[in-house]
Amino acid sequence: MAIAQAKLDATDARLATLSLPEGGWAEPARRDALARVQATGLPGRRDEYWKYTRPDMLTAETAAEAAIFDADEAPVFGEVDQLKLVFVDGVFDAAASDDLALDHVRIERLAEAGSADIHWARDLYGTLETAGQTPVARTLAALNTAFASDGVLIHVTGAAPKPIALVYHHADPKSDVMLHHVIRMDAGAALTLLESGPVAARCNMVMEIDVADNAAFNHVRVQGRDHERQAATHIFTRLGQESRFKSFTMTANGVMTRNECVIELTGDDASAHVAGACMGDGDFLHDDTVFITHDAVNCESRQVFKKVLRNGATGVFQGKILVKAGAQKTDGYQISQSLLLDGDSQFLAKPELEIYADDVACSHGSTSGAIDEDALFYLRARGIPHGIATDLLTLSFLAEAVEEIEDPDLAEEIVTRMEAWLARRRG
Amino acid sequence: MLEIKNLHVELEEEDKQILKGVNLTVEAGKVHAIMGPNGSGKSTLSYVLAGRDGYDVTEGSATLEGEDLLGLDPEERASLGLFLAFQYPVEIPGVGNMTFLRTAVNAQRKARGEDEMSATEFLKEIRAKAKELQIDAEMLKRPVNVGFSGGEKKRNEILQMAMLEPKMCILDETDSGLDVDAMKLVADGVNALRGAGRGFLVITHYQRLLNHIKPDVVHIMSNGRIVKTGGPELALEVEENGYGDILAEAV
């Protein structure tokens, strides 16, 4: 199908503002990605995959300004023993970061390692992203592969002794950032990766994670509270035999967030869990788009997405489970729910199942509702005031997503942030 | 303690009168029971007193120690000392039983201008009280009523009552869904709270709960009114002959 000229013009206008980093092992992958961007064009309003979320803010030539948010709470995960890597508006801050040294882990920066001719990341950079372009184009991710200015390359060979934390600060109201992380988990390796902060006024983030047999990757992300920030994120992962992948994202605020997660279960007995909890009010659009492909036997996948929407906020969920022929004994679960705290907010959901194997169990559910009146009365009858009772029931609604976080301390920290967000809005 | 005068209540949605002039006074330290056939208005009375939405009070009054209840929010009534043990306690996933109870205890204390209970103090109290009701530590940690058996849910209601130390307790069909052992456990819990000037209104279909919680006064409710009041022997009469004779006599 021919691409509309207007779309190509818009893509050209965006590309004209960018310059492709040259040299080193990554350049061929970058050039290839650029060619794909030019072939498909950046997402437009008429693309089916962007039916519920207008991509304009994410594809515009320049980023809309986003006021710097003065967070009045301690940094999230600040108390966790971690190896911290700090980026300010996408620029690595060595002084604020820890040494890049951790047992069983090799950590490098894309901007530095990229100039070498040979590197392990060459086989991965853009590879999972390219695979994730079928059957649906994810051109913002290709744009990122072509133009990402930095990121981290993490090679994990055993059990990492502590989490790696990527901390993103936003200091310039006009910053427009693309970061691209590549993570290679060798057989039997284990890592917890934490991400927190708004990144920039506008960010385009890609993470490619190759999880080999028996490896375990845990990911907990908290996207910053800046009200006007715009974010497009992609996670691409490929899972080997008996490997485990878990990713949880909390989003509070942000004018535009599109989090895509593309998972391919390629080894038998693998497990992938992806969960999200978002809370927003007013000028807030939050889109979770997930595509899980089962291409091996006896794999399990689980998607749990919860959205708390107030005062005209919009939530979007597009989630697909594709079970390929031969992927017998697949166990797929998907739930997406919204809690609408008033009549102005809306939730748009498109759950999809596509199954070509006959011995599978897949379930999906999507609901939209208000606070349960019976539960509210029960709490109030015990003396709990209306506002606090509503908050408790909101946390109750979010609980199933939070339970997807493996580490109880991290889960508790997330709940504390949610409580604070709700308490700030209590009348 | 609790004084209900000429209470008339309609269902908000369907313009249907449920209570047609209830008069009832529960004195401090006394246990009153209300019995009556299905649809007589017993549960409506408990909901209206606790402040549930969906009912219109068209006439009459209800006061607790002289304070008007009907104009107050449910949480204000609770802080005044009114407690309703639910017929169907609600399950609340993701909210721990302890968190819920501590929030409730401290919200009531705050509303009354009292100091909040510290975490240590609360833990000590709840452990002692839970033990009496044979509620184990595991149950305290679980989300409110989630995965609880019928008996566990009712014991959990009594635990809440014990922690909140209300002045006036309404038990709405607390015996429903309980086997004999569970009922005895619940009754023991209630009996332990008797005295200290606390009033009780026990709503039940059957006399058997009243073998364990001995009432001072028994009322028979029918068609939105109290039609007969007597001593504990009235409950025995119902058990033996059903409601038929009493209702025929009252009309």
Image (cartoon, grey):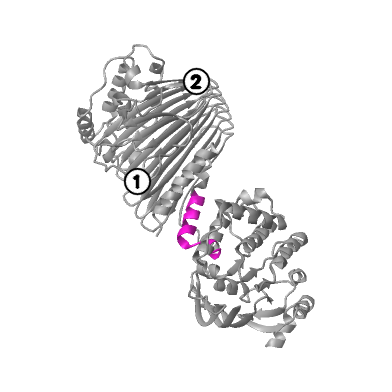
Chain ID of residue with mark 1: A
Chain ID of residue with mark 2: A
Name the residue furthest right: B240
Residue at the spot 59% in from the left edge and 34% down from the top edge: A359
Asked if residue B31 lies left or right of residue A63, the reply is: right
Residue at the spot 32% in from the left edge and 21% down from the top edge: A111
Secondary structure at numbered mark 2:
loop
Work out whether residue A138 can be spotted. no
Q: Position of residue A298 (x, y in %)?
A: 58, 30
Q: Which residue is mark 1?
A: A285
Q: Position of residue A277 (x, y in %)?
A: 45, 44
Question: Quick check: is A44 in the magenta stretch?
Answer: no
Report the quarter where the N terminus of chain A lies: top left
Q: Position of residue A110 (x, y in %)?
A: 35, 21
Q: Which amino acid, mark 1?
A: Leu
Between disc 2 and disc 1, the foreground one is 2
Residue at the spot 62% in from the left edge and 61% down from the top edge: B163
Asked if residue B46 lies left or right of residue A192, the reply is: right
Which span of residues is magenta-colored?
A: A379-397
Q: Which mark is residue A103?
A: 2
User: In which image quadrant can residue A143 be found?
Assistant: top left
Q: Position of residue A28 (x, y in %)?
A: 31, 16
Residue A311, placed above or below residue B14: above
Residue B249, placed above or below residue B148: below
Work out whether residue A401 can be spotted. yes
